[in-house]
Amino acid sequence: MDIAEFQAYGYFASTLFLVVVLYAYIYHLYSKKKNADGIDYEQYSNMALHDDIDDTPVASIRDDKKK
Amino acid sequence: MENRPLEYDYTVTKMFMFTTILLGIVGMLIGVILAFQLAFPGVNLFLGEGLAEYTNFSRLRPLHTDAVIFGFTLSGIFATWYYVGQRVLKVSMAESKLLMFLGKLHFWLYLVTVAAVVVSLFAGVTTSKEYAEFEWPIDIAIVVVWVLFGLGIFGLIGIRREKSLYISVWYYIATFLGIAMLYLFNNMEIPTMLASAPDGSHVGGNWYHSISMYAGTNDALVQWWYGHNAVAFGFTVPIVAMIYYFLPKESGQAIYSYKLSLLSFWGLMFLYLWAGGHHLLYSTVPDWVQTMGSIFSVILILPSWGSAINMLLTMKGEWQQVAASPLIKFMILASTFYMFSTLEGPIQAIKSVNAIAHFTDWIVGHVHDGVLGWVGFMIMAALFHMAPRVFKREIYSKSLMTTQFWIQTLGVVLYFTSMWIAGITQGMMWRAHDEFGNLAYSFIDTVTVLHPYYTIRGVGGLLYLVGFLMFAYNIYKTMSARPVEESELQSASPMGA
Amino acid sequence: MFHWLEKHPFFFSVGVFLVIAFAGLVEILPSFAQASRPVIGTKPYSILETTGRQIYIKNSCNACHSQLIRPFKSETDRYGHYSLSGEYAYDRPFLWGSKRTGPDLMRVGNYRTTDWHENHMKDPAGVVPGSVMPAYRWMYTNIADIPTAYAEQLTNAQFFSVPYNEPIPMKDGTTEVVKMGNNVTQAHAMALAEAKEIAADMKDQNVKDAVARGEIPEIVALIAYLNSLK
């Protein structure tokens, strides 16, 4: 197997891998929302709308540390 | 820190807003001069025979491209990062003395580097590689400036209150990483002062001179992998970062789909880097690289349009804002031009179209509808949005803004329509044969025919420059306009008559 | 796992980097492994040609002139044989250009003479009516920088094994040697010898006088470079 052939297989496999991962991620985001207590990914767009320094963060770093 | 409430600190933003405007004027002014030099060659001597060497088309051309890319656009990117970064991460620069110091150092070092670039390009010190013309000492300075930018990004992220990174931050990170990788690899060069004479004697010569680490075809391959993606990571990715923040904020509308933005982000990251090969169609690089360049350029429409459509749909049900606010007009026209030039690019990357378009003015036209229509409009909109918040004053004049919008739009339209016609005309004439199989036109025939289009292009560019000066004036007057209350700054920017 | 990358900036950055580096790894690295070899008849640049090439770069001639002939009948009719990868083996940097405001120069040495260039660089529109090319009159008085060109030759020889002072196979079966000086004084003498041949075909008295004095105006070096493009 010369370098060109290796390159071709490697290229195909990694592209396939990335495509699968990306679509799985998107699917994951949609299915998660369907659960009753699931997280709506769209809430994160509020990070731009409520961005004053004293606005409550959408997901605070501090909340996370308390757990 | 006494008992004052914590506020965002826009010192560094202000500094970079200043260079955005200053270098924008410089870059565009040189551009207009270049345009008229092509239409009327006498303009090459506009400062007289004695200075001809420094006012000549060929000396000014790299200054124009670099002033617009590394001056105007990069300053705009830095200015918006130091603004958007704080806000979406909900952390102030005032909270960290170190970050504040790095930010200011970033600015001053950037300014020194810009000055060095201007002097060296006027003197004709260049490596000739497009958008990478700087010799190695300046390259090193640029790397330092870039590292400071990176420290600014990751430092601010490190002390953030908001756990999750907003879309714009993804794009800023990608800008940082992408340019770092591309710039380093394309500027690998050997300073010629490292060589020694066979008999051990002193060689002399310019200490700053260097030659590329790569030769011929390989050099071309690396250069256009860089050249194309410098466009990607300088003119697309960070500008998308801006619109993802400023459009929702100014209009008060949440992004139409956060998930779509995720899909377009990763799609863009993966696909963009492949498309560089389309600059080298029918050249001596391997055929498969050329084909890959063509194919990926066409697929690239998907993530590009994903972002653009996301923007347009964000305005769903709120289209009256486009009529009411000149600021929204700028952003909507910017995303429209983004859609337009990301469709035009792939068309030019199709091999049979490229056979005609390559080496002609159509390519120049394509670059300019992207940069004038998309990059320029978005950066100006960002500065218009930031100005009232940075200065705590309303924008000086809404009517001036609207006038500027229409003048510049007319300018862009004149620019790209004339360059379309010029490019396709010249491309067809180069390849025309008469009935006996001889070339139908000598080269000079294909140059003189372009004169009217070059003139129209010059006028288009001039209109854009006039609009930009109006913009500079408007921002300048904003600094002394009516002060506003915090409550007026929630979404739509306050504007005076 | 939900929404994980966007909360972890480090891994997010690593992810972005891998995805953007991927194309470069696949597209560029393998081609480097099989770097192009010079075709028969391709010689390294002599000292005066190297100087001229630097002047070509200094004035961004590549902003308006390409050096890449594409394999179309209309281009081979106009400019000569289409370009081969190996012909660029000694080009650091490459000078393909991206815009043809003026014609391609890849093989300009085949169909233009010293005399033609001399008149054309002084007054382009006088030689080609309608030309939009500016004049380059300062090249007739600026003196060329031989030491920097010599340093470039040395760098090519020492870092990239460019074959100076070695026999190079030519198309007709013979070999030729491109000489490189042992020190900068020798290099200057060799450049001057080349310059005298060019100046003999020129009419500008100031240029002729300068060369007779031992100085080499930029225009002489540039013409030497342009004549070498074949």
Image (cartoon, coloured by chain):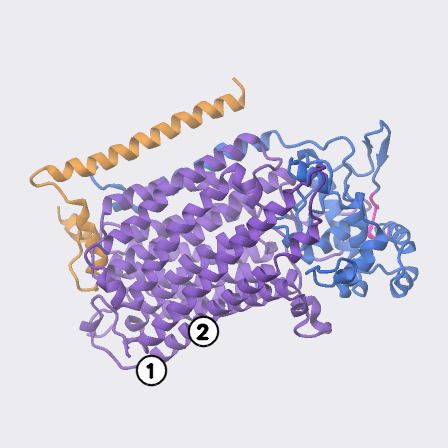
Which chain did the renderer colour orange? A
In the rendered view, tell whether residue B446 sits above or below residue C40: below
Q: Nearer the viewer, residue B406 or B1?
A: B406
Q: Is residue C228 left or right of residue B41?
A: right
**Vertical placement of B110 versus C100: above or below?**
below
Q: Position of residue A7 (x, y in %)?
A: 48, 26
> In the rendering, what colour is chain B?
purple
Question: Helix, strand, or loop for circle 2?
Answer: helix
In the displayed structure, B219 sits above or below C207; it is: above
- Amino acid carrying mark 1 in the image: Ser
Number of marks in the image? 2
Is residue C140 highlighted in magenta? no
Residue at 17% x, 62% y: name it: A55
| Residue at mark 1 | B480
Q: Amino acid at mark 2?
A: Leu
Percent position of residue B461, x then y? 51, 65
Q: Which chain is blue?
A: C
Residue B306 location, x and y as percent? Answer: 31, 45
What residue is pinned by disc 2?
B469
Determine the chain carrying the residue at label 1. B
Tell me the subunit letter for badge 2.
Answer: B
**Residue C162: image location, x then y, percent:** 74, 38
